Image (spheres, rainbow, N blue to C red):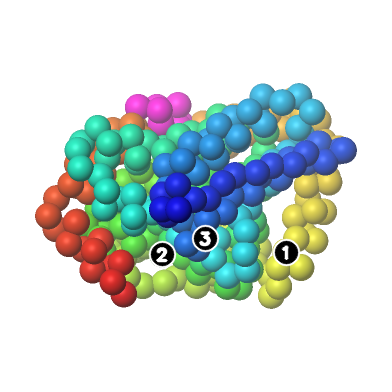
């Protein structure tokens, strides 16, 4: 099976209303369009489910949270509409997190690249392990973090986001990400992190749903234009991915 047809998203809902959304892909939890679409739809559906009190977003495995865009799918894009559609997948996931009337807890157990950093930025409260280094690698393959940029900038500020975007081949440590506000706390082991997530999720499951919904609206004030903004950013990336520079850069990365 081709890489772009692999991967999936699953979810569970506990008796006390904690919904756990888990995405996976054999290539370091990369995100082809199929997975992006299901992830956005799942978050939206759970946000509208009255039995859900809080959402936990996670991926499978130990050391890779998310490798970002699928290189195999990027290299297969041959026209502007297809490119815009693919990058709109990331926009849809970010907007689904933004619009969901439930607080979302992020669980970042390992490295996050590109769209993975965008996911970590789009949740409302994010835990990580000390292995959860971050990198915005888009410029290194001729694109730029245009779609995830607003979410990352909102969470860690323009200065820190620009550092990641400009020095696109260098990892920043989990400690750095915590200092900038991306992660709330980091842990030495997945077990310790999961215990902290469970504790917080249980507290939120007992909290006033209306108060949490209003609080989330406050957190996301000023982002009401993101449907249009992220669509415009997706078109920018969709155009750049067609360039000879980007095609050659992606092929070089795939050979490493």
For residue 73, side relative to residue 195 (left or right): left
Name the residue: 41% across, 49% down: 4
Secondary structure, mark 3, is: loop
Report which quarter residue 219 is drawn in.
top right
Name the residue: 23% across, 64% down: 251
**Residue 115 screen position, x and y as percent:** 43, 52
Task: Point out which mark residue 193 bears.
Answer: 1
Task: Point out which mark residue 135 bears.
Answer: 2
Badge 3 density bin: few <14, some 14–19, many ≥20, Cα 10 Å: few
For residue 10, side relative to residue 153 (left or right): right
Quadrant containing the C terminus is: bottom left
Depth order, front residue of 5/206: 5
Name the residue: 27% across, 48% down: 76
**Residue 98 screen position, x and y as percent:** 54, 34
User: Where are the magenta residues, as a range?
Assistant: 222-228
Secondary structure, mark 2, is: strand
In the rendered structure, which disc, 1 or 3, sits on the residue that comes first in sequence?
A: 3
Task: Point out which mark residue 26 bears.
Answer: 3
Circles 1, 3 touching at the beta carbon (< 8 Å): no
């Amino acid at each position: 099976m081709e890489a772009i047809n692999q991967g999936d998203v699953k979810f569970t809902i506990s008796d006390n209303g904690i919904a756990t959304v888990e995405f996976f892909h054999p290539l370091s939890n990369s995100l082809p369009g199929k997975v992006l679409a299901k992830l956005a739809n799942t978050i939206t559906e759970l946000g509208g489910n009255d039995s859900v009190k809080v959402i936990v977003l996670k991926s499978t495995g130990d050391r890779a949270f998310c490798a970002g865009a699928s290189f195999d799918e990027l290299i297969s894009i041959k026209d502007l509409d297809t490119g815009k559609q693919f990058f709109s997948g990331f926009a849809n996931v970010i907007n689904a997190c933004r619009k969901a009337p439930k607080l979302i807890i992020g669980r970042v157990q390992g490295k996050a690249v590109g769209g993975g950093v965008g996911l970590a930025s789009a949740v409302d409260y994010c835990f990580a392990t000390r292995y959860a280094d971050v990198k915005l690698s888009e410029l290194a393959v001729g694109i730029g973090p245009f779609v995830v940029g607003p979410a990352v900038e909102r969470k860690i500020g323009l200065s820190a986001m620009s550092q990641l975007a400009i020095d696109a081949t260098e990892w920043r440590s989990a400690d750095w990400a915590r200092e900038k506000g991306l992660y709330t706390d980091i842990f030495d082991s997945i077990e310790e992190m999961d215990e902290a997530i469970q504790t917080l999720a249980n507290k939120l499951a007992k909290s006033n749903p209306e108060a949490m919904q209003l609080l989330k609206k406050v957190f996301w004030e000023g982002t009401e234009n993101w449907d249009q903004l992220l669509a415009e950013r997706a078109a920018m990336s969709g155009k750049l991915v067609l360039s000879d520079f980007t095609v050659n850069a992606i092929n070089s990365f795939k050979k490493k």
